[in-house]
């Protein structure tokens, strides 16, 4: 078991390294840097000024060196300037321009390994605090999505799958296929138009979730939750139905039936546990999918979480924020996979992690 | 009756002349008010001179206290003199005051200046600083503070300092700083400005949004971190892209309470709902906000329908679709030839753009960026529209097969208007490819695109925007226009205080802009804002200013 964890951790670190290097490489291409310089400095800078601006901020070092600095395995860059007759130093590990003596005492390494996630150029704040706040908001959204999506999907799937081909099955399956075939940007817009706008006039809910960041309630939070949940719900329900239908044809179910066990008892006690193995993986796979879905839904509903941050960071070439977003994504994907693998062991004794 | 001028001095002779012209119908109400008040007549005095009824104060009936939530983009703040968005200024306007404030009716209201006096040929300004004003750190506000700010605005070499263009006549060309003797402090509350050439735009420049008055200790850092100002509010929090909160400063008694009334609200929240007007509507319908920054396009009707109050401001705000004359595409400069640019302009019927791009909510413009509401507007007739002639001209210039890439931002009216231009160019037989960029990337390069659309906010005088946007080498000269003849004519116009005399030069300038095919400028926008019936003092302002002290909730 311990070895298994270590191996998984190794894979996680390796994946994170590869992914961040790709993101690092792309965001540090010269046209992207030029764009960054112009947003941060001045839209009308000449090419020489852009080069100067980038050089003064350490952006023009060789790519591997910059990446190593971001990781914290190479000392951060420093630059010396003359200001008001004395030498001041700016650098990766320094906060603004400081006198040389003070700069000498500052830590030489400041990267991820030292716990320094960098500074977001678009939000003008430290990356760690942005990721912390925004991930918390998205976590809250996801929690409610899961709470709505998983039970209702399982219920739908089990009800549909226990009597394959029945009227209940056909009705529920149609519903499940419809919801999962409708992408969030379609269902979200429809839900807003129907339930939150004067176009239809129901106005049961609010069409924006901005207030939900501080004060979430049923009225302002239900629509974004429903939009994400509907999409995943149909998918999980289909999986559960297929799995349930298969289990219901198994020999041991027929045996139980012949012995006179009541139908509800068969479903609950004999079929369910075996039928849930496949949906369990799918549910765990939904976490990364949710990260994907929140990008659209958070932008649509103006809920400023992780997905919205990703959009802003990518739109403004905010290098260090984008890198942090990729690291977090890798961790979320691999940790949920880990949980899914371990959960398997408990659901199916025939499988072992070692 | 109180005295008709802001300093108790006799009324400037030109003001009386304007009043006469106004009564004879030669001047519009707005033009008259703008001109008379910039010559030192009080707003009340100007209304009396022109024989107009005094408007009721908009903020009457506001109760004390309350929280107002406003939908507005929340951008990163910067040194006020380098601010490039009205939204940025609306936030620091909570704790920073201005020398002068431009009013929705076109007049100038004295704020930190109590009054000003301009000599006949506009080469000497005598400014009286308001007495009894204190900074919120306790320091007294004096003429020295005003001089300090004007000197800051004169620092031309500071990156992105757009105030330098507004006070160009006070700058020494060699040092790029305030000229020796241009600013003279003559008392605790009096100073004299001596522009190098007759300059009529200084007062209007002082009212523009980057002209917020900062404390002498301010050193260019993020204004939120050091909120020392003379205004009645303080920033509580400022999160870019999310929201910004102003709260009433309990330890500071604001000078304006006695003079103009207010502030009324305890708390003002600016909440960012992105750039999609559909989400602004969603915010309004969800009762998440009480007031919008601006309502646009088809949403104006919808907002009317949900029972919000509409406020309209007639403006010289506009959209300009311009080729950049120095931009290079694949090694050549496609728009260097005036024939190409003229052909583009001739192929476009401006009224079609107004109809398709802005639902007809404005007036048709004439491709020279001077608006009928500007005092010095000269009518040189509508812009020529001749699609066949345009294509012939394009062929003559050898550019008939060139594929034009027309860039615009991804929004409602700007995108639609640019689409309308593209469609008309295609109808005339030109090849056009449309590129639509999101706001986050569009503004990175807005002056550099070879052919793109840009929205321009208005300035009170017609010469001001020409000086900002079309003079050679200006920071915001997005057309790459450099014509010595234009520059010298504009310099001449900028020295004529009398708008009627200035109009003759303006006619030549306007014609020059049109002959050089500098811009396609289809229409002037009326702008709108909606708010709930609970909000008072939130009237739409022609330059999108939100004056925090006027806002309130109905009693």
Image (cartoon, coloured by chain):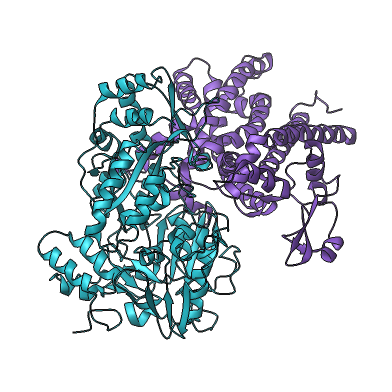
Of B417 and B155, which appears nearest the observer? Answer: B155
Is A51 left or right of B231, judged from the image as shown? right
Residue A99 image-quadrant placement = bottom right
Identify whether B6 is placed above or below B391: below
Q: Residue at x 65, y 19 (%)?
A: A256
Residue B443 x %, y %:
50, 43
Q: Is residue A57 visible?
A: no
Of B380 and B488, which appears nearest the observer? Answer: B488
Chain A rendering hue: purple
Identify whether A232 is placed above or below A161: below
Residue B389 x %, y %:
26, 23
Residue B2 image-quadrant placement = bottom left
Q: Residue at x 22, y 70 (%)?
A: B14
The cyan one among the chains is B
Q: Residue at x 38, y 32 (%)?
A: B338
Q: Residue at x 38, y 22 (%)?
A: B397
């Amino acid at each position: 078991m311990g070895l298994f964890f270590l191996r998984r951790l190794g894979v996680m670190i390796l994946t994170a390294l590869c992914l961040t290097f790709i993101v690092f490489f792309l965001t540090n291409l010269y046209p992207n840097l030029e764009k960054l310089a112009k947003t941060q400095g001045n839209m009308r800078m000449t090419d020489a000024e852009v080069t100067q601006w980038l050089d003064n901020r350490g952006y023009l070092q060789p790519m591997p060196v910059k990446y190593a600095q971001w990781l914290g395995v190479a000392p951060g860059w420093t630059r010396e300037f003359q200001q008001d007759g004395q030498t001041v130093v700016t650098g990766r590990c320094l906060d603004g321009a400081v006198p040389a003596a003070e700069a000498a005492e500052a830590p030489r390494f400041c990267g991820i390994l030292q716990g320094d996630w960098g500074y977001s150029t678009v939000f003008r704040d430290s990356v760690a605090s942005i990721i912390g706040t925004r991930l918390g908001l998205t976590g809250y959204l996801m929690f409610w999505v899961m709470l709505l999506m998983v039970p209702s999907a399982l219920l739908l799937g089990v009800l549909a799958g226990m009597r394959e081909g029945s009227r209940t099955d056909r009705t529920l399956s149609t519903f499940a296929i419809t919801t999962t075939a409708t992408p969030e940007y379609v269902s979200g817009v429809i839900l807003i138009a129907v339930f939150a706008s004067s176009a239809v006039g129901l106005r049961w809910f609010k069409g924006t979730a901005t207030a939900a960041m501080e004060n979430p309630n049923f009225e302002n939070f239900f629509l974004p939750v429903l939009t994400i949940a509907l999409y995943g719900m149909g998918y999980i329900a289909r999986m559960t139905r297929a799995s349930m239908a298969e289990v219901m044809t198994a020999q041991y179910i027929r045996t139980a039936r012949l012995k006179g066990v009541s139908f509800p008892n068969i479903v609950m006690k004999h079929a369910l546990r075996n039928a849930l193995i496949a949906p369990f993986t799918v549910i765990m796979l939904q976490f990364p999918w949710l990260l994907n879905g929140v990008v659209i839904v958070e932008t649509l509903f103006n809920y400023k979480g992780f997905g919205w941050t990703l959009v802003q960071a990518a739109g403004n070439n905010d290098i260090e924020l984008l890198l942090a977003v990729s690291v977090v994504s890798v961790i979320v994907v691999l940790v949920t996979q880990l949980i899914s693998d371990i959960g398997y062991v408990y659901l199916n004794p025939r499988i072992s992690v070692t | 009756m109180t005295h008709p001028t802001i300093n108790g001095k006799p009324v400037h002779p030109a003001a009386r002349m304007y009043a006469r012209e106004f009564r004879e119908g030669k001047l519009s109400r707005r033009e008259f008010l703008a001109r008379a008040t910039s010559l030192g007549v009080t707003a009340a005095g100007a209304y009396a001179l022109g024989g107009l009824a005094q408007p009721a104060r908009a903020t009457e009936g506001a109760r004390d206290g309350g929280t107002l939530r406003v939908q507005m983009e929340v951008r990163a703040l910067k040194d006020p003199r380098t601010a490039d968005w009205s939204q940025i200024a609306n936030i620091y306007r909570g704790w920073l005051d201005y020398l002068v404030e431009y009013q929705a009716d076109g007049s100038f209201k004295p704020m930190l200046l109590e009054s000003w006096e301009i000599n006949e040929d506009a080469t000497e300004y005598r400014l009286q600083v308001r007495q009894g004003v204190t900074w919120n750190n306790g320091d007294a506000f004096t003429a020295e503070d005003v001089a300090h700010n004007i000197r800051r605005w004169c620092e031309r070499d500071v990156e992105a300092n757009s105030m330098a263009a507004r006070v160009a006549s006070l700058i020494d060309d060699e040092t790029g700083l305030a000229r020796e003797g241009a600013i003279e402090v003559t008392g605790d509350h009096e100073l004299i400005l001596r522009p190098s050439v007759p300059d009529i735009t200084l007062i209007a420049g002082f009212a523009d949004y980057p002209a917020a008055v900062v404390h002498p200790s301010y050193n260019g850092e993020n204004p939120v971190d050091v909120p020392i100002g003379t205004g009645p509010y303080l920033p509580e929090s400022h999160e870019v892209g999310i929201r910004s909160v102003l709260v009433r400063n309990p330890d500071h008694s604001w000078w304006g309470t006695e003079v103009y009334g207010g502030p009324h609200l305890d708390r003002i929240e600016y909440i960012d709902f992105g750039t999609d007007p559909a989400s602004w509507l969603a915010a309004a319908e969800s009762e998440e906000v009480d007031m919008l920054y601006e309502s646009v396009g088809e949403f104006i009707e919808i907002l009317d329908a949900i029972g919000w109050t509409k406020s309209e401001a007639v403006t010289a705000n506009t959209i300009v679709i311009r080729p950049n004359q120095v931009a290079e595409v694949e090694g050549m400069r496609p728009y260097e030839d005036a024939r190409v640019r003229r052909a583009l302009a001739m192929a476009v019927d401006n009224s079609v753009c107004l109809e398709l791009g802005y639902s007809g909510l404005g007036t048709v413009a004439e491709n020279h960026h001077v608006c009928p509401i500007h005092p010095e507007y000269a009518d040189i007739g509508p812009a020529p529209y001749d699609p066949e002639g345009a294509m012939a001209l394009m062929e003559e210039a050898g550019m008939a097969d060139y594929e034009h890439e027309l860039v615009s931002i991804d929004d409602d009216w700007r995108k639609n208007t640019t689409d309308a231009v593209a469609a008309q160019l295609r109808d005339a037989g030109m090849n056009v490819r449309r590129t639509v960029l999101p706001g986050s990337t569009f503004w990175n390069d807005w002056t550099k695109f070879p052919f793109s659309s840009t929205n321009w906010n208005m300035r009170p005088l017609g010469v001001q925007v020409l000086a900002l946007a079309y003079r050679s080498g200006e920071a915001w000269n997005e057309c790459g226009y450099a014509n010595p003849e234009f520059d010298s004519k504009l310099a001449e116009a900028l020295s004529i205080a009398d708008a009627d005399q200035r109009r003759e030069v303006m006619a030549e300038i306007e014609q020059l802009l049109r002959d050089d095919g500098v811009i396609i400028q289809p229409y002037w926008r009326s702008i709108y804002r909606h708010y709930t019936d609970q909000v008072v003092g939130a009237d739409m302002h022609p330059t999108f200013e939100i004056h925090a002290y006027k806002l309130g909730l109905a009693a």
